[in-house]
Image (cartoon, coloured by chain):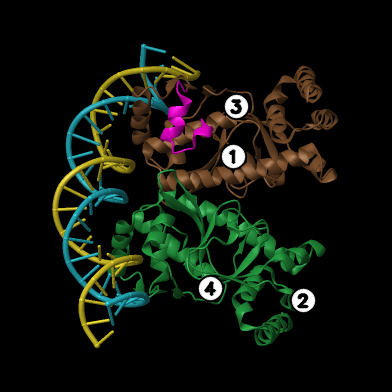
Chain colours: A brown, B green, C cyan, D yellow
DNA sequence: CGTCTTATTGACCATCCTCAAGCGACGTGG
DNA sequence: CCACGTCGCTTGAGGATGGTCAATAAGACG
């Protein structure tokens, strides 16, 4: 036990030192998902190519090269669907480390993807290839778990919009985002960045912008969140998770 | 062209005569999805075994043999999720021809499945095996398309609960169910069976029972649906599809 | 320092929920 | 056969939640 743990931690340190900094959130996320052995991981690091940048508002997957899967390195995106009258429903928010495109899970393929902030991506082709070549490898495991998690996220979204009230919805989304960002090292149990406008939050939660503003004020006044300048703090994760109708262990 | 069409139709007639009646909805659905060649189809017919019955309220996939995928032959089911306080959100309604269990799409695996009416199922193991053995066969194609459709259905569910109002939600669900049932031959463009209580509809749409009752009355009074004894008629599919914020071709 | 976007606030209205009562179909037991 | 539940559906009344509109404030950015 002690040796295994020590090995993993040393791998982690090594790679964080060796891999360029722009890979860190992605690598951290993949390791969290798949327990990828060191040789596979360095293989992946060597083959991560095809970096791209998109300005906010762009649609990375509406391009000619649409068929190729991408990892998000930096920035936020969303997969959305529009009604004829202009209303928008965001199916899923996409954060660094998330996979979008053909190989991805529900809600991140087959729908328009839009960059919510300036976005940096890298081709996921290398990872998909590795998964095919080694059906029992760590990368394969990571991608499979990623797809599984994507499904859960969509089901969570149905739960939110279908059966939760406004404050519950917002609380639930905050808890979800905290968890997802913590997996990439971009946040921890109590703090994370949230560079989204309230219009985006509203279209995710199925509420109006005005109401989201009021709900935010409500949560703040109850001491459940602090919200200064794109950075969210959760002073009492347990209480927030309870409000979101989650089980205690989601805190 | 003419020969191909004639061949398909003759296959269909043959199998409807040869296959036992309980297979018809399932076979019709699989053929709709995958254009399965005659030899593959008769192969499948010969290997469809493991029929089971469940009373309404039972949880077919909460059993010890939980891992095995099933086709629904007859009756309706739902995959649901419950909140700590007892509220229920139905993620997806399951109709004859649908696949549930490990090989199935989003919303029909990893969640409790409950029989909404008396349910008849058959093991889907034979079909899954055939899909593995013939990666370019019709059964494989049918299962892949089925999984794709399942994803779309969950995304539709997010759209419904997130961005549609009450009447729109109900109209949208009716149009969806009509389409799905038409694929099994259990209904056509204007009529289909709907053996669900309004509580089930409410938990699917994210509304209260009382409100569903009122919405139903509203649609009836506008001449958009008739609703007698578990049988729904849509006198004006186009207008209903428009109300549901769907494109014209969904009518 | 203007201009544009985003966030907040108030007032009013629509939607939807809850509670409660009543009704009808159906099944069960006397 | 009828009395009596139970279950599902409907209806009314009143209240909570959330939406719309409009005005204002607060940032962001050139």
Residue A168, image x and y in percent? 40, 37
Mark 4 vs mark 3, CA separation in Å: 46 Å
Tell me the SS state at disc 1: loop
Q: Which residue is mark 1?
A: A59
Confirm or deny contact between disc 4 and disc 3 (CB under 8 A).
no
Q: Which chain is indicated by disc 4?
A: B
Q: Which residue occupies the foreground of this view, B32 or A241?
A: A241
Res D24 quadrant in image = top left
Q: Are marks 1 and 3 in contact (CB under 8 Å)?
A: no
Q: Are marks 1 and 2 in contact (CB under 8 Å)?
A: no
Q: Is residue A63 a member of the stretch shown in magenta?
A: no
Can residue B228 be seen in this snapshot? Answer: no
Q: CA distance from mark 4 to mark 1?
A: 36 Å
Q: Is residue B123 visible?
A: yes
Residue bearing the label numbered 2: B43
When the figure is inspected, residue C28 is found, relative to residue B58, above or below; the finding is: below
* Circle 3 residue: A182
Q: Percent from the top left, x then y, of residue B62? A: 58, 56
Q: Quadrant of residue B191?
A: bottom left
| Marks 1, 3: nearer the viewer | 3
In percent of width and height, residue B8 lies at 70, 80
Q: Which residues are magenta?
A: A234-251
**A237 inside magenta stretch:** yes
Is label 2 in contact with label 3 (beta carbons under 8 Å)? Answer: no
Residue under pointer 4: B182
Question: Upstream in the sequence, badge 1 or badge 3?
Answer: 1
Q: Is residue B137 above or below residue A192?
A: below
Near mark 1 (Cα within 10 A), the count class, few <14, some 14-19 or many ≥20, is some
């Amino acid at each position: 036990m002690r040796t295994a743990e020590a090995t993993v931690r040393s791998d982690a340190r090594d790679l964080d030192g060796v891999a360029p900094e722009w890979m860190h959130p992605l690598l951290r996320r993949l390791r969290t998902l798949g327990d990828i052995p060191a040789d596979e991981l360095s293989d992946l690091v060597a083959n991560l190519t095809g970096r791209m940048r998109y300005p906010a508002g762009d649609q990375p997957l509406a391009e000619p090269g649409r068929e190729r899967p991408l990892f998000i390195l930096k920035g936020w995106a969303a997969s959305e669907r529009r009604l004829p009258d202009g209303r928008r429903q965001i199916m899923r928010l996409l954060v660094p480390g998330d996979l979008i495109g053909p190989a991805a899970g529900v809600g991140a393929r087959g729908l328009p993807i839009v960059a919510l902030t300036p976005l940096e991506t890298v081709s996921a082709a290398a990872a998909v290839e590795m998964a095919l070549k080694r059906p029992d490898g760590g990368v394969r495991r990571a991608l499979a778990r990623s797809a599984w998690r994507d499904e859960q996220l969509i089901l969570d979204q149905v739960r939110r919009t279908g059966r939760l009230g406004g404050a519950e919805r917002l609380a639930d989304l905050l808890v979800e985002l905290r968890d997802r960002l913590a997996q990439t090292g971009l946040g921890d149990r109590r703090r994370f960045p949230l560079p989204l406008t309230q219009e985006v939050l509203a279209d995710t939660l199925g509420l109006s912008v005005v109401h989201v503003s009021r709900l935010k004020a409500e949560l703040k006044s109850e001491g459940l969140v602090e919200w200064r300048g794109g950075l969210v703090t959760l002073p009492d994760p347990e209480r927030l998770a309870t409000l979101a109708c989650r089980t205690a262990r989601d805190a």
